[in-house]
Image (cartoon, rainbow, N blue to C red):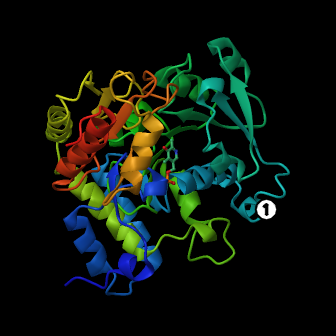
């Protein structure tokens, strides 16, 4: 039974997502089995704490870790996980975060190349970053105020690898947190980093896992996960009360993990390549056009993307105008934000490269994207088709 179409009612345009799991584009679409599980869960009240606990235990078993918690996204997992490290041995201090950190550890060690926008999720708790570049600096960075060692799994740089990062932190009795939010597939990443010894690992629920956009996974040590539960909804005065996770998101997150574990990396990759090749094939007689299929050279969004290049003397349109034409067309298509950029992490493409993210395309949308690109590029080549 379909519900009322509120996008139409509100006058909000539906788009074709030829970009990827970007938050601004509402990330991913839940597979039908996940949508159905969410709709079923929405019908019945339950006890929130009982649901969170059961979901966590189920996820921990399926994802081969000690404990798990469904958060309202990876960003809140970063905030809550950091706060858990601060309060695990002093639960009463949770009421003072972030305005009074007296007596609490508040330094987070991070590689300079791992600094990123999501730092903000950690500094919400009042912590400060201590940057290191070399192994020597890392070993010397630990002190009485050291709270945790943060690793950004999708970083492009950084001298120190996963194993060394964990080993040195543990030599100092300091927990390690890996932000792998956008780093599924491969599916096995879901247990790879906890198995390496990271005390906390987070994944976004609404990206490659294809759960609800405002869900996330926090995986790791049971004492830390328990500390997160102790500062979360339904407790009204809790630090994490504003990061409440609804029953629909909790169930959707679990159902999405169940769905993902029925998939295979090889089949997903083959399907994405098929789409990219189909679009490339449809464009192959555009003058000077060259296509290639590229998997970004970072851990994030590690799936095939289609890159298109052409001679601007032959096809007289810049990448920014291709973006605008597809966005303003009907249906409205959103291309990958690396389009036209030479410094986009993971791509570093030539100027005016068109980047098509094929993995979030739904049934038959690859054909629509191919036709629209052909129209726009052929027109710019002087051939009206
Ligand atoms: C997307 C992302 C996040 C935030 O994830 P949400 O689930 O949207 O909160 C955090 N860290 C990294 C590296 C990300 O890519």
Number of marks present in the image shown: 1
The residue located at (29%, 55%) in the rendering is 257
Vertical comparison of 336 with 168: above or below: below
Q: Mark 1 points at which residue?
A: 96
Depicted 65 relative to depicted 6: above or below? above
Answer with left or right where residue 218 lies relative to residue 141: left
Assess disc 1: are there few (<14), some (14-19) or many (≥20) residues with their C-alpha within 10 Å of its C-alpha: few
Q: On the rendered image, what quadrant is the N terminus found in?
A: bottom left
Q: Residue at x 62, y 53 (%)?
A: 79
Q: Is mark 1 on a helix, strand or loop?
A: helix
Please report the residue visible at 71 percent of the width from the left and 61 percent of the height from the top: 94
Q: In this view, does 183 lie to the left or right of 360?
A: right
User: Relative to the observer, which residue lies in front, 65 or 264?
Assistant: 264
Residue 276 percent coordinates (x, y): 21, 36
Q: Where is residue 372 in the image (x, y as percent from the top left)?
A: 26, 47
In this rendering, would 105 be left or right of 233?
Answer: right
The answer to which image quadrant residue 269 occupies is top left
């Amino acid at each position: 039974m379909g519900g009322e179409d509120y996008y139409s009612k509100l006058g909000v345009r539906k788009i074709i997502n030829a970009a990827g799991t970007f938050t601004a584009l509402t990330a991913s679409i839940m597979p039908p089995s996940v949508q159905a599980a969410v709709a079923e869960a929405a019908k019945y009240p339950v006890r929130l704490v009982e649901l969170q606990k059961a979901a966590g235990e189920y996820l921990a078993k399926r994802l081969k870790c000690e404990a798990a918690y469904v958060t309202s996204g990876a960003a809140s997992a970063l905030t809550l996980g950091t706060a858990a490290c601060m309060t695990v041995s002093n639960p009463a201090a949770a009421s003072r975060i972030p305005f009074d950190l007296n007596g609490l550890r508040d330094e987070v060690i991070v590689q300079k190349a791992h600094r990123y926008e999501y730092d903000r999720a950690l500094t919400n708790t009042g912590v400060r970053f201590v940057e290191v570049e070399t192994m020597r600096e890392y070993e010397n960075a630990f002190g009485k105020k050291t709270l945790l060692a943060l690793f950004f799994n999708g970083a492009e740089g950084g001298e120190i690898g996963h194993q060394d990062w964990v080993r040195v932190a543990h030599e100092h009795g300091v927990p390690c947190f890996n932000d792998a939010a956008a780093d599924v597939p491969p599916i096995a990443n879901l247990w790879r980093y906890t198995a390496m010894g990271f005390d906390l690992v987070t994944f976004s629920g609404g990206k490659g896992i294809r759960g609800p956009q405002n869900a996330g996974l926090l995986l790791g040590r049971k004492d830390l996960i328990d500390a997160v539960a102790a500062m979360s909804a339904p407790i009204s005065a809790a630090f994490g009360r504003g990061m409440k996770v609804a029953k629909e998101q909790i169930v959707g997150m679990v159902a999405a993990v169940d769905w993902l574990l029925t998939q295979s990396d090889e089949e997903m990759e083959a399907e994405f390549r098929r789409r990219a090749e189909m679009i490339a094939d449809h464009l192959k007689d555009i003058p000077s056009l060259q296509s290639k299929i590229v998997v970004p050279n970072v851990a994030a969004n590690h799936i095939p993307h289609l890159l298109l290049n052409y001679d601007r003397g032959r096809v007289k349109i810049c990448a920014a105008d291709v973006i605008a034409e597809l966005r303003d067309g009907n249906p409205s298509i959103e291309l990958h934000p690396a389009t036209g950029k030479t410094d986009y992490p993971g791509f570093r493409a030539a100027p005016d490269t068109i980047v098509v993210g094929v993995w979030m395309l739904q049934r038959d949308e690859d054909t629509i994207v191919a036709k629209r690109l052909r129209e726009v590029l052929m027109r710019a080549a002087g051939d009206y088709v």
